[in-house]
Image: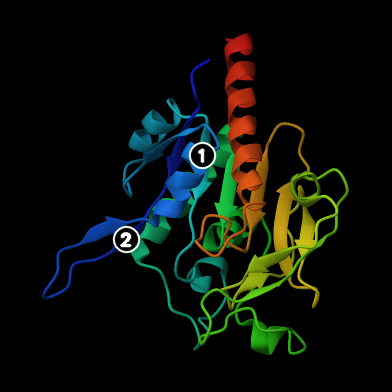
Amino acid sequence: MRKPLIALNADYRSAKKDAPAYSFLAAGYYDGIMRANGVPVIIPPYGDEADIEAVLDLVQGVVFVGGLDLDPRRDGFMVHPSQRLMEARRERFDRLLMDRVAARRLPVLAIGAGMQLLNVSQGGNLYLHIPEDVPHALPHKCPEDPEHRHALIVTAPGSVMDRVYRDSEIRVNSMHHMAVDEVAPGFQVTARAPDGVIEAIESTQDDWFAIGTQFHPEADSASALDMRIFEEFVEAAATHRSLMRAAA
């Protein structure tokens, strides 16, 4: 059986005086897909919606990667002084891509800033700076230790997070200062840090496999167990393809 094609967005940097514009992507994202028996396809930040639709006609799932902060002004909020905003070209594309993916109900794995976009695109909102918005929170971003890890508590029996981690003692990498506040309709919280900060959300809609993780299962600091998140996602993409073929 042919492996499912999985699209990934990429980070973007605009041209500077001494460097051209370029796209880039941490290898862990596509390596995770390949290890899970999928075929990754990296897509550039298209400006034409028809081009996005043409690509989505070919793939069976989409990974939204991490990156710098979403611009809260696009969702009706002010920029916080702590924020380092992602490039406008990337964010415009990511938001348009997420809208089209959601409309098609393509399987989604959204990581880091990708999870935050998944939540706001579907009607949720965000904490803009955990140290201020959740004063009792433990550190979720440690400048002295980029591989900083904290415990994780699975909160939803039967969820992907529950299937992946079961009764294991879980510690995940943590590198964020923003987080999900109100969860979008049609989604549930499936994992939290011990301080209550949301670390994973999943769709509760029967026709849409969509999961977001605030931690990074693709990173070098991830555990072997974290890899199973990619396996669950790629399996969902393969199932989606089979259902679309049956309906055709």
Q: Nearer the viewer, mark 2 or mark 1?
A: 1
- Label 2, label 1: how far apart the Cα atoms are: 25 Å
Q: Residue furthest right?
A: 157
Q: Residue furthest left?
A: 18
> Is 51 placed above or below 197 here?
above
Kind of element beneath mark 2: strand
Disc on res. 103: none
Disc on res. 12: 2
Q: Amino acid at mark 2?
A: Tyr
Q: Quadrant of residue 163?
A: top right
Disc on res. 35: 1
Kind of element beneath mark 1: helix
Q: Quadrant of residue 181?
A: bottom right
Q: Nearer the viewer, residue 240 or 78?
A: 240
Q: Nearer the viewer, residue 187 or 231?
A: 231
Q: Position of residue 241 (x, y in %)?
A: 57, 21
The residue lying at 60 percent from left, 58 percent from top is: 115
Q: How many numbered circles are shown?
A: 2
Q: Is residue 56 left or right of residue 42?
A: right
The residue lying at 33 percent from left, 50 percent from top is: 45
> Is 37 placed above or below 82 here?
above
| Applied colour scheme | rainbow
Confirm whether residue 126 shows in the render.
no
Q: Position of residue 14 (x, y in %)?
A: 24, 66
Q: Position of residue 62 (x, y in %)?
A: 51, 40
Confirm whether residue 242 shows in the render.
yes
